[in-house]
Amino acid sequence: MQPRENAFTSGPALVGYISALEFVVHLPNPGGYGFFTDELYFMACGEHLSFGYVDMPPLTALQAWAARGLFGDSLTAVRLFPTFAAAGLILLTGALVRQFGGGRFAQVLAAVAVLLAPFFLGFSSYLSMNSIEPLLWMGCAYVLIRIIKTGDARLWLWFGLIAGIGLENKDTMLLFGFVLIAGLMMTPQRRLTANRWFVFGGLIALLIFLPNLIWMIQRHFPHLEMLANIRRNQRNIAPSPIGFVGLQLLGTQPVAAPVWIGGLFLLLLDASYKEYRALGWAYVIALLILLLMRGRFYYLAPSYPMLFAAGAVGAERWLDRSHRYHLGWAYVALLVATGLAIAVNTLPLLPPVTYIAYTHLIGVSQPKFEHRQSSELPQLLADRCGWPEMVAAVAQVYNAIPSDERARTAIFAQNYGEAGAIDFYGPKLGLPKAISGHVNYWYWGPRNYTGESVIVLGNARERLEKYFSKVEDKGAVGNPYAMASEHFEIYLCSQPKGWTFAQRWPELKTWD
């Protein structure tokens, strides 16, 4: 028997304490890192609210706009929503365990596993689509479990609401919605779809998604064009099927893997879980689709909390039968110890010099997922380095230009990180908003600049001399810990050779 619970040591209370740790893990910044490159872009998108963007639906930009409006421009302010989502995911994991019939130990085991899984540690460390996606996927899973348990078909309305919000966050919500319904159709619970509430739920999801869908149709689905470009230039690292599965083990933490693997087998094979078999099939179908389509390895990550929940309940039942709870709590302690060691390798907790020494000592660093050359830091840390210094160097060049020319001088960035950094840090240094052809910056256009005077970041002099009669090297930038692509020369270019930005803008589109 488990020890007697009280209000402060009950399963839900312990899960609540564990969820509060997300604020300790993510909001302090002991490593001294800055904004991640994507965050700078999302904040720029938040200044151009729209029903869609080239590379994402609108919810992340809306979060950036709301966070800055409510809480300010600090790292803590911008990352509050991801941290709330991470804490909510822990609470929801505990709720999933209780729906499966689990008690206090199972709730703690599942909550700790989710808290310390590298997937979720990384997702929650900065504002992105990924930071809220697991909460939305598991929200749909929770509602489906409630529909199965209660037979209340009206809950499909809540399923549709959460799925619709998920579609406004990231297109992969389509994948999870599809595999959940496909899994349901493979079980006797398919009968739960034969009612008007199921249809109404789908209509709610469609209605919420409709503004973004119309935006994409009007622009001929720019996101698909971008994905085709990425496949063509082979930017992403596509692991083999074995490598893909191996990365699932790393992303969930190898010591915790027996919990979710056990949960998957229980959902698929154990008679006590037969009502919920659709969840197991949903995972299997999603895995097969991603293997066939060579999807990114972390696309499957949001599905793991439901497997952790099922596996934790199975472990608790075994411990109940064997009366070996000391082994269970020892396993939780081991999970915490290994999880903390991995967290140091995953999160921006250590300053760059210390982090590099640590990874050399243990011989393990974060896996690469793009064919981009990094520094000694992995990409998820390197892309947080050097932005204020880069903007300060650009400001020095811009403010040295005679005042009558300065107002006509554009700042052209090669990617959204550089442009977003100029937009975020630049105003305090007297800089105008940047222009760029990268993803949604291309839609925002040249901002009435003609091209007669341009500060160009990160392009080759030989290329620039094809388009400008005068090209001046104004010095190099590059934080030693930043990505290799962020080590470049700044050029001041003028006297364009018979063109204007309005004429050339279509060919400057860079969607990759």
Image (cartoon, grey):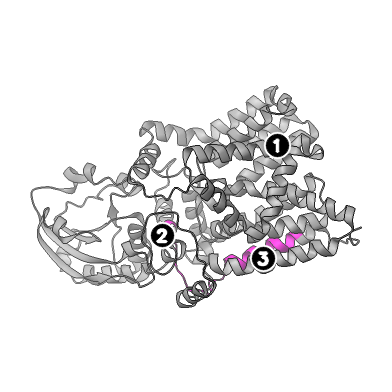
Q: Earlier in the sequence, mark 2 or mark 1?
A: 2
Instruction: Give the vertical position of 313 relative to 481 (above or below).
Output: above
Q: Earlier in the sequence, mark 2 or mark 3?
A: 3
Which residue is at the front of the view, 423 or 230? 230
Give the CA separation, mark 3 to mark 1.
28 Å
In the visual, does 102 lie left or right of 4?
Answer: left
Tell me which label, 3 or 1, sits earlier in the chain.
3
Q: Quadrant of residue 142?
A: top right
Residue 417: image location, x then y, percent = 36, 58
Q: CA distance from mark 2 to mark 3?
A: 26 Å
Quadrant of the image containing the N terminus: bottom right
Instruction: Give the structural element (helix, strand or loop) at label 1.
Output: helix
Q: Is residue 100 above or below residue 250?
A: above
What amino acid type should be assigned to the residue bearing mark 1?
Leu
The numbered disc on residue 144 is 1
Q: Secondary structure at mark 2?
A: helix
Disc 2 versus disc 1: distance between alpha carbons?
36 Å
| Viewer can see residue 348 | yes
Badge 3 is on which residue?
21
Q: Nearer the viewer, residue 313 or 217?
A: 313
Q: Is residue 238 above or below residue 357?
A: above
Q: Residue at x 84, y 50 (%)?
A: 317
Q: Residues within 10 Å of mark 3 (few under 14, many from 20)?
A: some
Give the residue at x 80% y 34%. 150
Q: Nearest the camera: 432 or 479?
A: 479
The type of residue carrying mark 2 is Thr
341 relative to 108 in the view: left or right: left
Q: Secondary structure at mark 3?
A: helix
Q: Amino acid at mark 3?
A: Leu
- C-beta proximity under 8 Å, tags 2 and 1: no
Query: Where are the magenta residues, as a range?
Result: 15-38
Q: Which residue is tagged 2? A: 37
